[in-house]
Image (tube, rainbow, N blue to C red):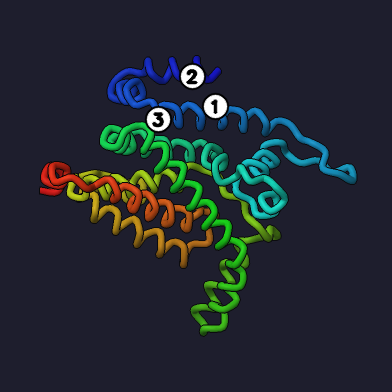
Amino acid sequence: MFRRLSLFLRSLPGSLGIILSNYPAVRAITCISVAVFLIQCLASFFTVPIGDGARAPLDALLSAIFGIHWPWFSHGCIWQPVTYAFLHGSFWHLFLNLFTLIFLGYSVERLLGTRRFWTIFLVSSAIGGIGWMVFDIFEPRLWYWVAQQGRIGLSLAQRWGESQGFVRYGVCVGASGGVFGLMGAFTALCPRQQISLLLFYVIPITMEARYMALLLVAFNLFEMVTSMGHIAYVAHLLGGLVGYLMARRHVRSRDYWEHYYA
């Protein structure tokens, strides 16, 4: 299935097919993510016994085992910091990550090569995921402290508590940490390159990569504090920082600086 999917993606028309044909790391991550998502969709039709006559959806079990989830990680699922990046929670989650991966990540692979691209993606993804897991463990204590800081803090803590439901530990899935790592790498490599994005997925804006990075950092920090959704903002921020720092190591030669920073 993986080979057929790879051939299909490479045969797509336009710039999408060109990118997937010429950049093997981008193509491989895309193929793996799409294949795993199809398996997740298929698994959602099945349930498995979990004891005492109870059953659980198979896709939820796969997310707990291969996503970042502290109880399973602490009991030996040490592969989670790598595997969680290839699972996604919905079609749009997958689409947004792959869209950014394909149309921004290929520039990183072109500038640094396939091996370094893989290194940045996997390391930033893993550190972002582990950082999110640690934050998830201590988050209740953080919000308990926030609740004691006044009326606004209490209101924010109440909103957070209501958003958690009955789940003590969350599950993190998705390539966002690695994708943000590639964004950070691109910012380190081409800080003055003009790039565009859709603000709030509606408003098109264009600015230099370094300013775009600062905007994304501010947005994620703001959302992490005020939004009670289940989005791994910590993984975004840590992944982006790791990718930036790793790419900075390769920005050494005088020719490179003259070409991209002039």
Question: Quick one: quadrant of the N terminus?
Answer: top right
Q: Which residue is mark 3?
A: 25
Residue at the extreme right of the image, as rendered: 52
- Name the amino acid, label 2: Leu
Q: Earlier in the sequence, mark 1 or mark 2?
A: 2
C-alpha distance separating marks 2 and 3: 15 Å
Q: Secondary structure at mark 3?
A: helix
Say the numbered circle drawn on residue 35. 1
Q: Position of residue 182 (x, y in %)?
A: 36, 44
Write the residue at 30% across / 38% down: 108
Q: Position of residue 223 (x, y in %)?
A: 43, 61
Residues 56 and 72: in front is 72
Quarter of the image for residue 105 reads top left
Judge whether residue 96 can be spotted in this image: no
Q: Is mark 1 in CB contact (under 8 Å) with mark 2?
A: yes
Residues 5 and 251: in front is 251
Closer to us: mark 1 or mark 3? 3
Q: Which residue is mark 2?
A: 5
- Name the amino acid, label 3: Ala
Q: Secondary structure at mark 1?
A: helix
Q: Earlier in the sequence, mark 1 or mark 3?
A: 3
Q: Secondary structure at mark 2?
A: helix
Q: Is residue 22 above or below residue 26?
A: above
- Name the amino acid, label 1: Ala
